[in-house]
Amino acid sequence: MTLPAELAAYLQKHPETRFVDAVLYDLCGTAIGKRVPVRDAAKLWSSGVAFCAGITTLDALGTCWDVNGIGFSDGDPDATSYPVPGTLVPVPWAAAPTAQVQIAPAPPEDAPHWWFDPRAILGDIVVRFAALGLKPVVACELEFYLVDPARDASGRVTPARPRQSGRAPEAPRVLAFDKLDEWAEILAEIDAACVAQGVPAEAATAEYGGAQFEVNLGHVDDPVLACDHALMLRRIVKGVANRHGLDATFMSKPFADQSGSGLHIHASLVDDAGRNVLDETTPDGDRILGHAIAGLQATTYDAMAFFAPNINAYRRFAPNQFVPVNTSWGINNRSVSFRVPMGGGKARRIEHRIAGADANPYLVMAAMLAGFHHGIENRMQPTPPSTGNAGEEADPEMPLRLWTALDRLEGSTLMADYFGPRYPAAYAAIKRSEFEAFMADVLPREHDWYL
């Protein structure tokens, strides 16, 4: 059999390869797929790999809830997925020499894509900017914890303890180099894996929580690719941590007494000539920036269930925690939801700070860009910028419980316009079912409080 050109070139460079992982991501951003022996890998390109079409609707337990006829009602049909060109890369942390290639489902016969595929939904929203003569340029930042795989006596996880210093794992040392040095080997392996896989990792910083870190990804002019990078980074971090006998978590709030983990997105817009239209030195820079921020302010509460997709994610939101609790914006101010960082001119951008690190990046990016587009298209005006502490008090209108966020999403005509008429209700139904399954068990605290 003649090998596909991409596979042939890869195997010439990596002849030791034994397996190829065909990877896509479910609704929670978990990497799923099939591991194929290299002798059969060419079939991925020629005939694809079949999964149930509703794979991108699975919840945190991998359950399909038969929402909107996806699953049992329609006979759980397969959709054939094929490699995304240019995504065949090594898996440096694998025990046996392994490659990975991202796959995407071929569309059904009667539609350009599966209506419930988050990656395709994001692609549709990006296309809308072409009519405005604009293209988004975006970058993701992800926070995570390294954690001890052993649970404590109460069944809880704890931050990983540094082996060199024996320092208390919960010790907060934001931006501290000694903390980076303690975990230098793992962080270096994460960076090396990013290089090997073409993930544009830039700075790594020590965050507030014990064994909590942030990795910044470089700006790209393809939002779908940026989200691919974010999910690849999540797999890299978990894979490298496991290689060192640790776990890694992107939970929004894994520890009640430590800082949460966020997914921040930096975004600007360029015109057909490649000029940043948010640049304040241009005649319309401030105006377009204001329109984009106003659109975010108008759409954020409707999209909150995308930014905070599970019950744990809402534990992250509290006043005075550098976590957004309203729709404020400001310049060089980390207490707001929509921050305009220092470094104007060509580098001027908006940082969206609401989402948790466990949110689906495709849906977060889609919701953020929907806000940009809505505000610019309708020439909306923002509130005045906030100065000082904008996070001192939560907005009572902000849906800071999962069930209220799901109600808001399901009733949103704006989200239905951008995500498709069926998707908001389907997503809400999936997450409600997941929540009901979570609540079906008696929790330990119920015994502590009510026995």
Image (cartoon, grey):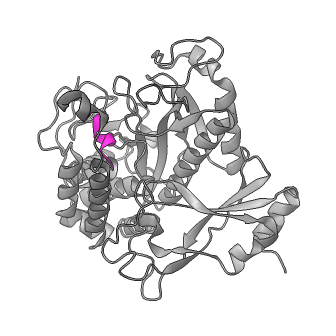
Report the number of numbered marks. 0
Position of the C terminus, as image quadrant, is top left
Asked if 404 appears above or below 447 in the picture, the reply is: below
Q: Is residue 166 visible?
A: yes
Q: Is residue 422 magenta?
A: no
Asked if 377 appears above or below 354 in the picture, the reply is: below
**Residue at 65 percent of width and 33 percent of height:** 245
How far across and down, in percent of the image, does residue 287 sit?
A: 26, 48
**Residue at 11 percent of width and 39 percent of height:** 396
- Relative to 303, 204 lies left or right: right
Work out whether residue 372 or residue 413 is closer to the camera in this orientation and state it.
413
- Relative to 72, 152 lies left or right: right
How far across and down, in percent of the image, does residue 169 sit?
A: 51, 18
**Residue at 42 percent of width and 88 percent of height:** 110
The dominant secondary structure in magenta is: helix
How far across and down, in percent of the image, does residue 35 sit?
A: 68, 62
Q: Residue 259 lies in what quarter of the image?
A: top left
**Residue at 35 percent of width and 56 percent of height:** 369
Q: Is residue 301 visible?
A: no
How far across and down, in percent of the image, does residue 34 sit?
A: 64, 64
- The stretch in magenta equals 310-315
- Relative to 79, 317 lies left or right: left
Asked if 261 appears above or below 416 in the picture, the reply is: above
In the image, farthest residue toward the left: 396
- Relative to 108, 116 lies left or right: left
In the image, farthest residue toward the bottom: 109
Position of the N terminus, as image quadrant, is bottom right
